[in-house]
Amino acid sequence: QAKLNGGAWPANRPWSLNGADRTGESQFLISLGPQETHKFVLGSDGGPCDGWLEIEADQGSEVKNLSTAFFYNFISGGELSASAGVTPSPSQLAFRFPVEKTAGLGTGVAIRRSGDIKLSLYDDAGNLVETAEMAFEGAAFFEEFFEAVPLNFIGSLKVESGVGFYLLVLRQEITSNPPNLRFQLTSIPATPVP
């Protein structure tokens, strides 16, 4: 199990997790199997406020390494107004990060290096879906590396190589509310894999 802690925001500020009211709560447990991926949507109304969020393995858990990614969307008047992301990862031999694909959302990756890379795609239950090996340098959506990824997909991607490489994970979100079209591009942290 993994434990999610949060705090430092006003204790009476209403907030929710995946649509369920969690006002007044600051800790709960999440059960994750090996290689399993879960998406959690935290929401709260009102202006920005200070706070913190920590994900850690619960005491006695067999979890050795948790890979997490956070992205923040700010909504004003029902419209996406801003997103926040992260900087590129330092050179490593392997990375793992969550991927998601829907009609208005895509995950991409930018890689800078030379030589071959191996990509392993896992579904949200941690099952290996497909692998690919190739020489690649540049940017592409994750599904371009594989035969067929369904329209609605949540999982994770492991990218590895025999030599160090630099990686930036991109998140593209498009919302359409005619006649307005909003496009947001931000980044997601990638976790180095030992």
Image (cartoon, rainbow, N blue to C red):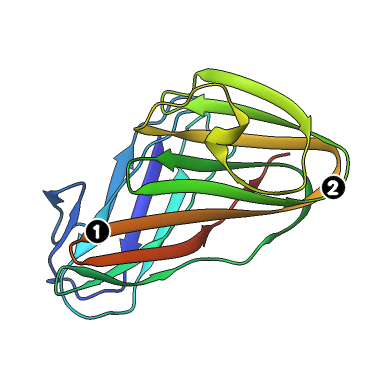
Residue 77 position, x and y percent, is 14, 74
Q: Is 93 positioned to the left or the right of 35 in the image?
A: right
Question: Looking at the image, which is closer to me, 184 or 11?
Answer: 184
Question: Callout 1: 10 Å neighbours few (<14), some, many (20+)?
Answer: few
Question: Callout 2: 10 Å neighbours few (<14), some, many (20+)?
Answer: some
Structural distance between the alpha carbons of marks 2 and 1: 39 Å
In this view of the protein, can residue 58 be seen by the observer?
no
Residue 7 position, x and y percent, is 31, 67
Instruction: Assign a secondary structure to mark 2.
Output: strand
Residue 26 position, x and y percent, is 25, 58
Q: Which mark is residue 176?
A: 1
Instruction: Assign a secondary structure to mark 1.
Output: strand
Q: Which mark is residue 75?
A: none
Q: Quadrant of the C terminus?
A: top right
Q: Which quadrant of the figure has residue 91?
A: bottom right
Q: Which quadrant of the figure has residue 153?
A: top left
In this view of the protein, can residue 7 be seen by the observer?
yes
Residue bearing the label numbered 2: 164
Considering only vertical position in the picture, is 73 above or below 174?
below
Q: Specify which label sits upstream in the sequence, 2 or 1.
A: 2
Q: Is 143 positioned to the left or the right of 191 in the image?
A: left
Looking at the picture, which amino acid does disc 1 mark?
A: Ser
